[in-house]
Amino acid sequence: MNYLKVLWKHNDINEPVELYYEIADDNFDVRKVEKYRGGTYGYAFNEHEINGSILSECAMPEVEKIAAQEEFEPHEITKEEFEEVWRLAILSNYSK
């Protein structure tokens, strides 16, 4: 598994600003977290889609291709960093 954090630089308040991915060896995302301005989270795994987050139907592009797009800033992260964000996303949706 690989783990990726992508900062999405834009001004649309309805879109997430941070994207977190757990990526399998086939380059498909297995779990995903989306963080919005104000601290709201969405997440997706298997067939579960919470707060509008969905897993991709296509393989993830290479980090270099993501970085080549001006509005995206990708960073490889550790499994532990992903798990912390995953935990926060789940807890934030249960506390509503």
Image: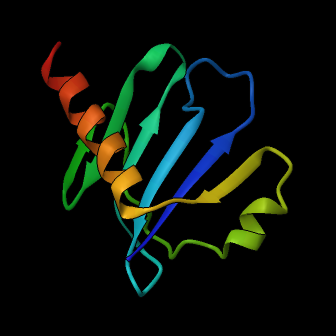
At a point 49% along the width and 73% down the height, the residue shown is 58
**Image height of 58 relative to 83, above or below:** below
Which x, y percent locates residue 57?
A: 43, 68
Which image quadrant is residue 86 in?
Answer: top left
At a point 65% along the width and 42% down the height, the residue shown is 7
The residue lying toward the viewer, choosing from 5 and 71, is 5
Which x, y percent locates residue 37?
A: 55, 19
Which image quadrant is residue 21 in?
Answer: bottom left
Q: Is residue 81 left or right of residue 4?
A: left
Placement of the N terminus among the 4 image quadrants: bottom left
**Image height of 6 relative to 60, above or below:** above
Which image quadrant is residue 53 in?
Answer: top left
**Image height of 13 relative to 20, above or below:** above
Image colouring: rainbow
Placement of the C terminus among the 4 image quadrants: top left
At a point 51% along the width and 59% down the height, the residue shown is 77
Q: Is residue 71 left or right of residue 33?
A: right
Which x, y percent locates residue 32?
A: 38, 52
At a point 56% along the width and 38% down the height, the residue shown is 18
Residue closest to the far bottom = 26
The residue lying toward the viewer, choosing from 71 and 80, is 80
Which x, y percent locates residue 35?
A: 46, 32
How many callouts does the rendering have? 0
**Image height of 32 relative to 9, above or below:** below
